[in-house]
Amino acid sequence: SFWHILLGKGLWSLFTLGFVFWIPHYLHRTHDLGLGVIGTAMGVYTLGIGATGILTVGWVTQRLQVRDIRWLLGILVVAALVAIPFIWIFLTTKSIWVAALCALPPVFVYSANLGPTSSAAQAVVPANMRTVTAGLTQVVQGFLGMGLGPFVPGVISDLLEPRFGADSLRYSLMLLSLLWLWASIHFLLANRTIREDIARADRINMGAERSE
C-alpha cells in the first residue's frame, strides 16, 4: 500500500501545484482580471478556504478512521469526486461570479491530501523507517508537484494551441484535473491492504520494543 500512497500523493500534488501556478494566467486571459485582483483573490481563497479545508478534512478524517482506517485515504477519493465537476465548471463558465463560487470546493480540498497521505505513509512502515519515509514522500511530492506541476500544463497547452487557440490552457487544466481521479485509484488500491500493512508494522514495532 505504501507505493500506492506515494504515487497518489505525487499525482494529487502534480495537478494541485500546476493548477495554482497557471490559474493567474488563465484568469487574466479568460476573464481579463488584473494581476492585483487575482493575487488578492488567491490570497483570500488560499489562506481562508484552503487552510479551513485542511483542518476540516483532517478533523473529519480523524473521526472516520476510528470506525474504519480506510477512510484515511477514502476521504480523498470523495473529495476528488466532489471537486472535479466544480473545476470543470470553473474552467468553462463565462461568468466570473460563477467561477468564484465554483472555485470554493476545489480550493477547500486541494491541499487536503497532505495530512491523510502523510499519516497513512507513516502508519504502514515500521518506526525505524519513518524518517526515510518522510524524506521519500517529500522527494516525490517535490518532483511531481513543484517540479512537473508548473511544467506539464504549459506543455499540454502548447500542444493543444493549434486546435483550440486561446482556449488551449483551459483544456490543458481540464485534462490534468483527471490526475485527481488517477490519484484516487491509487488510494483505493492502497486501501485493499492498508489494514494488513498497518498491523504488520505494529507487530514489527512491538518486536523491536521487546528486544530492547
Image: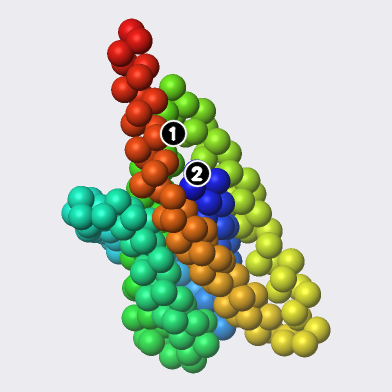
Tag count in the figure? 2
The residue wearing badge 1 is 125
Residue displayed at 65% across by 84% down: 167
**SS state under label 1:** loop
**Residue 195 in the image, given as x and y percentages of width and height:** 36, 47
| Lateral position of residue 143 relative to residue 52, left or right | right
Residue displayed at 41% across by 66% down: 77
Q: Residues within 10 Å of mark 1 (few under 14, many from 20)?
A: many
Q: Which amino acid type is marked by label 1?
A: Val
Q: Is residue 32 above or below residue 45?
A: below
The residue wearing badge 2 is 2
* Residue 203 falls in image quadrant: top left
| Lateral position of residue 31 relative to residue 204, left or right | right
Q: CA distance from mark 2 to mark 1?
A: 8 Å
**SS state under label 2:** helix
Q: Residues within 10 Å of mark 2 (few under 14, many from 20)?
A: many
